[in-house]
Image: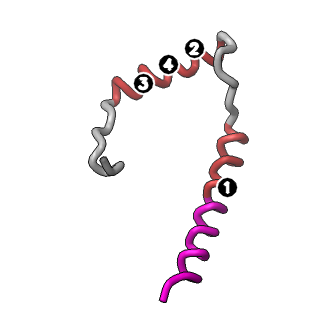
Amino acid sequence: MRAVDARLCTVSESIARSCQEVKSMRTGQAPKRSLSSLFAKIDEWAGEEKSDVHSNTDTAV
């Protein structure tokens, strides 16, 4: 199944999942995340996408 075909969650499901994540972070079951770590991860993903784009253009005929 492609990602586009997957069912998107409802707003209430998303909020419930977020609350579960926050609860697990507060109890120490999951590592705490910060806004700066989110931005660092986004920069990392952007770098991966750029390298994927460049590698795809190098192999194109």
Labelled disc at residue 19: 4
Residue 43 bears which disc, if any?
Answer: 1
Density class for disc 4 (Cα within 10 Å; few <14, some 14-19, many ≥20) is few
Q: Nearer the viewer, mark 3 or mark 1?
A: 1
Mark 2 → mark 3, Cα distance in angstroms:
12 Å
Stretch in magenta = 46-61
User: Which residue lies under the disc numbered 3?
Assistant: 15
Q: Is residue 57 above or below residue 19?
A: below
Instruction: Identify the mark nearer the N-term, 1 or 2.
Output: 2
Give the vertical position of 22 relative to 48 (above or below): above
Asked if disc 1 and disc 4 are in contact, CB closer than 8 Å, the reply is no
Task: List x then y, in percent, for residue 36.
Answer: 72, 41
Q: Amino acid at mark 1?
A: Asp
Amino acid tagged 4: Cys
Residue assigned mark 2? 23
Q: CA distance from mark 1 to mark 2?
A: 27 Å
Residue 38, image x, y percentages: 65, 42
Residue found at x 65% / y 21%: 30
